[in-house]
Image (cartoon, rainbow, N blue to C red):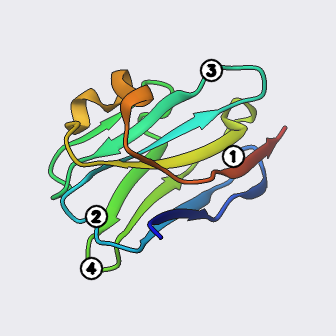
């Protein structure tokens, strides 16, 4: 069965760092656009970052620009999210996503139509 499995979440103090990973199993997603979204309690799911198949096109939400870095290793079928200078408002469940047709620049606006989602990993940033 095809799965996206996130890992790397946890509890961290404000100003700290975490690295999330999302490994795909069941098939290869090397040609898919990949991304990260997050959802805080009581809030809508929001876009965090996206990356095209080659890693040549990358987009970030304004709220994380300069602090978070998305990357991918197609040989390992894995996408990463390096999160630095974390803030309490970054607290959320983080989801990875993969889609075969949505370009990286459009992922933010099409999240309801994206093909494959992981189960999420919780990131908690304490003040």
Total labels: the figure holds 4
Q: Of callouts 4 and 2, which one flags the residue occurring earlier in the amino acid sequence?
A: 2
Instruction: Name the spot of residue 86 as percent of width and height, x first.
Output: 65, 43
Number of other residues with Cα within 10 Å of mark 2, as a class: few under 14, some 14 to 19, many 20 or more: many
Up/down of 66 relative to 110, above or below: below
User: Tag 2's secondary structure?
Assistant: loop
Quote the CA–CA distance across marks 1 and 3: 24 Å
**Are the residues at dot 3 and dot 4 in contact (C-beta closer than 8 Å)?**
no
Q: Quadrant of residue 73?
A: bottom left
Name the disc covering residue 15, or none. Answer: 1
Q: Quadrant of residue 30?
A: bottom left
Instruction: Name the spot of residue 26 as percent of width and height, x first.
Output: 40, 74
Q: Of callouts 1 and 3, which one flags the residue occurring earlier in the amino acid sequence?
A: 1
Number of other residues with Cα within 10 Å of mark 1, as a class: few under 14, some 14 to 19, many 20 or more: some
Q: Of callouts 3 and 4, which one flags the residue occurring earlier in the amino acid sequence?
A: 3
Give the number of the mark in front: 1 or 3. 3
Q: Of callouts 3 and 2, which one flags the residue occurring earlier in the amino acid sequence?
A: 2
Outermost residue, bottom side: 75
Q: Residue at x 49, y 56 (%)?
A: 82
Name the disc covering residue 44, or none. Answer: 3
Give the number of the mark in front: 1 or 4. 4
Give the labeled residue for mark 2. Answer: 29
Quote the CA–CA distance across marks 1 and 4: 32 Å
Quote the CA–CA distance across marks 3 and 4: 33 Å
Asked if residue 14 lies left or right of residue 55, the reply is right
Instruction: Name the spot of residue 78 as percent of width and height, x first.
Output: 39, 69
Q: Residue at x 24, y 38 (%)?
A: 104
Up/down of 35 relative to 3, above or below: above
Give the labeled residue for mark 4. Answer: 75
- Foreground residue among 33 and 123: 33
Q: Of callouts 1 and 4, which one flags the residue occurring earlier in the amino acid sequence?
A: 1
Quote the CA–CA distance across marks 4 and 2: 10 Å
């Amino acid at each position: 069965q095809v799965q996206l499995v996130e890992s790397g979440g946890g509890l961290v103090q404000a100003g700290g760092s975490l690295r999330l990973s999302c490994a795909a199993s069941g098939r290869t997603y090397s040609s898919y656009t990949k991304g990260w979204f997050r959802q805080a309690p009581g809030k809508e799911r929001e876009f965090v970052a996206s990356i095209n198949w080659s890693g040549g096109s990358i987009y970030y939400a304004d709220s994380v620009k300069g602090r978070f870095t998305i990357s991918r290793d197609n040989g390992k079928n894995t996408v990463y999210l390096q999160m630095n200078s974390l803030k309490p408002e970054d607290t959320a469940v983080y989801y990875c996503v993969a889609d075969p047709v949505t370009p990286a620049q459009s992922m933010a606006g099409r999240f309801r139509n994206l093909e494959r989602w992981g189960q999420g990993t919780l990131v908690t940033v304490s003040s």
